[in-house]
């Protein structure tokens, strides 16, 4: 077995299922995830499998991990840490040298959220964290691996040197959020799929792009549309026929007024008069059947030109997330 593996999956292919099936009652597992949706899903599925959350399985959100598990136990007393500062760091801190602690900590002893991982590095704390991981855990799992960015990605690469089993699971094209960014650090990490894979392989991480290539959630019509129009290779485990179509004028009112069809919009869903979710915010959710994807104006132009694959990557990824929530029929609503 590969001790360090990243499985790159497609939407609905069973990422969380694979994580749950990896668990047992003998080894000690630490599971890290980023979004609230996935955290709740993993806890629920573990409880479903075992009937409870076993003591040998720990589930943490990412920032609980890097602050409460990594930083605070080793740096609390010396720096009197009081928590995390969630706003952007003041501009003046960018000019401070990397070894200047004021670059990382506010006057109130809060750590800037996007520099916690770098602070851990410059204080020489990484070997202590590796020792802690090796002492208390046998298996280190990260779900939503594609959300790692900035210094956080570098920290996880450093921790991957621990003598544990590592399983990382993610979907490169569902990179819609980033744990943190700081200047140019890893700013181009998700610009090129091949370079991303190569970088991980250079860290002696085996990258598996085949195990989770087929979606259990999405029907063939959705997978074909995503493959053809977004350029994201995706297959379906299903064989049933469903509809994906551009909405015509006569259908708009009927679809918008149908509460059984979830409306997915680029942003500002809370301002709309019908129940809807933002494209990026529905990541990790698996309970939609029929969907209505409401395009942006620029997205509509690209759709009409057959050029969706050349959308800005952040927009294309969010559209991919929205489309891939669909279990049944999908209606695409153009903007004027």
Image (cartoon, grey):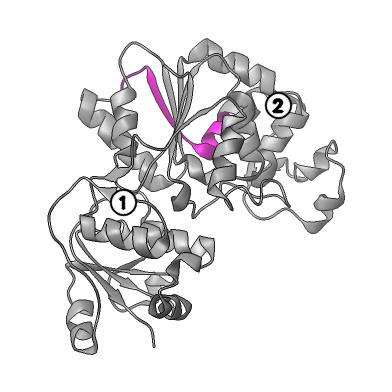
- Label 1 packing within 10 angstroms: few (<14), some (14-19), many (20+): some
Range covered by the magenta-colored residues: 54-68
Number of on-image labels: 2
Point out which mark residue 99 bears: none
- Horizontal placement of 200 versus 323: left or right? right
The foreground one among 315 and 220 is: 220
Label pair 2/1, CB-CB below 8 angstroms: no
**Which residue is located at x 47 percent, y 47 percent?**
172
Q: Is residue 191 above or below residue 79?
A: below
Q: Quadrant of residue 299?
A: bottom left
Q: Identify the residue under disc 1.
A: 285
**SS of the residue under disc 1:** loop
Q: CA distance from mark 2 to mark 1?
A: 36 Å
**Which residue is located at x 69 percent, y 28 percent?**
76
Q: Identify the residue under disc 2.
A: 75
**Which residue is located at x 53 percent, y 27 percent?**
205
Q: Is residue 287 above or below residue 308?
A: above
Q: Is residue 279 visible?
A: no
- Horizontal placement of 257 versus 31: left or right? left
């Amino acid at each position: 077995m590969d001790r360090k593996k990243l499985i790159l999956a497609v939407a609905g292919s069973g990422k969380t299922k694979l994580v749950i099936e990896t668990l047992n009652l003998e080894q000690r597992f630490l599971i890290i995830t980023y979004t609230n949706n996935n955290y709740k899903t993993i806890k629920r599925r573990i409880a479903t499998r075992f009937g409870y959350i076993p003591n040998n399985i720990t589930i943490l959100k990412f920032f609980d991990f890097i602050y409460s598990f990594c930083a605070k136990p080793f740096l609390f007393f010396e720096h009197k840490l009081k928590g995390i500062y969630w706003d952007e760091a003041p501009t003046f801190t960018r000019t401070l040298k990397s070894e200047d602690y004021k670059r990382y900590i506010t006057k109130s002893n809060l750590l800037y959220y996007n520099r916690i991982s770098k602070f851990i590095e410059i204080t020489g704390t990484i070997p202590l964290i590796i020792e802690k991981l090796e002492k208390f855990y046998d298996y280190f799992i990260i779900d939503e691996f594609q959300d790692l960015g900035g210094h956080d990605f570098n920290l996880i690469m450093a921790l991957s040197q621990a003598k544990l089993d590592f399983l990382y699971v993610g979907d490169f094209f569902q990179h819609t959020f980033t744990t943190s960014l700081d200047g140019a650090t890893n700013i181009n990490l998700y610009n090129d799929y091949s370079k991303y894979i190569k970088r991980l392989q250079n860290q002696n991480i085996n990258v598996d792009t085949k195990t989770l290539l087929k979606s259990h959630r999405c029907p063939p019509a959705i997978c074909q549309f995503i493959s053809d129009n977004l350029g994201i290779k995706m297959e379906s485990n299903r064989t049933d026929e469903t509809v994906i179509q551009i909405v015509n004028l006569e259908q708009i009112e009927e679809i918008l007024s149908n509460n059984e069809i979830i409306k997915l919009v680029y942003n500002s869903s809370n301002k709309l008069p019908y129940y809807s979710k933002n494209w990026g915010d529905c990541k990790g959710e698996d309970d939609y059947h029929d969907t209505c994807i409401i395009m942006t104006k620029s997205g509509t132009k690209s759709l009409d030109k057959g050029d969706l694959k050349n959308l800005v990557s952040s927009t294309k990824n969010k559209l991919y997330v929205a489309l891939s929530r669909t279990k049944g029929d999908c209606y695409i609503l153009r903007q004027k």
